Image (tube, rainbow, N blue to C red):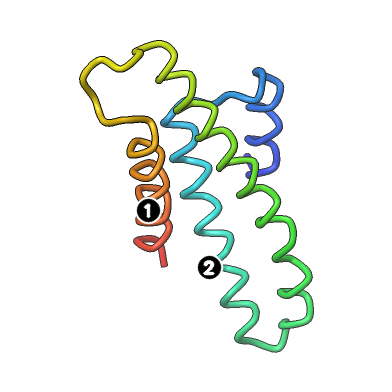
Amino acid sequence: MDLAALVQQAEKKGNMATQEEIGGMSNLSAHIEEMIKQMARTRTSIRASNNTRTPRKLNNFIKGFNQRLQEQMKAKNGSAGGPDPETQQKLAGKMLIDGQKRQT
């Protein structure tokens, strides 16, 4: 299944995705970006630069899914002794970036 289809499925579910789905989409996105970088290093650089637009748009959707999931978790759990929402969001973003870095 491709990344666009996964994003579309999450959109149909009310623009929500589970943490596992978000992680999977982020991982797939990192692989796509790496492939585009490899294409850019070869003679297909013109096509590679054109292909970077779609992953960027899909990454924005993935970030939105993550943000909505964090908001949903906050509303569900309240402030039950965990980190404040701002810290949780920073941690989630860091995890997303770290996961993408590991793939490169």
Give the crowd class for mark 2: few <14, some 14-19, many >=20 residues within 10 Å.
some
Task: Give the amino acid at mark 1.
Answer: Gly
| Residue plotted at (42% across, 47% down) | 93
The disc placed on residue 99 is 1
Classify 34 as above or below 31: below
User: Residue 28: where, in percent of width, then height?
Assistant: 52, 50
The spot of residue 84 in percent (x, y) is 31, 30
- Measuring 48% from the left and 19% from the top, which residue is drawn there? 72
Identify which residue, 68 or 43, lies in the foreground.
68
Mark 2 belongs to which amino acid? Answer: Glu
Above-or-below relation of 39 to 87: below
Q: Secondary structure at mark 2?
A: helix
User: In the image, is 76 to the left or to the right of 52?
Assistant: left
Classify 10 Å Cα crowding around label 1: few (below 14), some (14-19), many (20 and above).
Answer: some
**Quadrant housing the N terminus:** top right
Residue 102 lies left or right of residue 32; in this view the side is left
Quadrant where the C terminus is found in the figure: bottom left
Q: Residue at x 78, y 75 (%)?
A: 47
Above or below 71: residue 99: below
Q: Quadrant of residue 97?
A: bottom left
The disc placed on residue 34 is 2
Give the Cα distance between marks 2 and 1: 13 Å
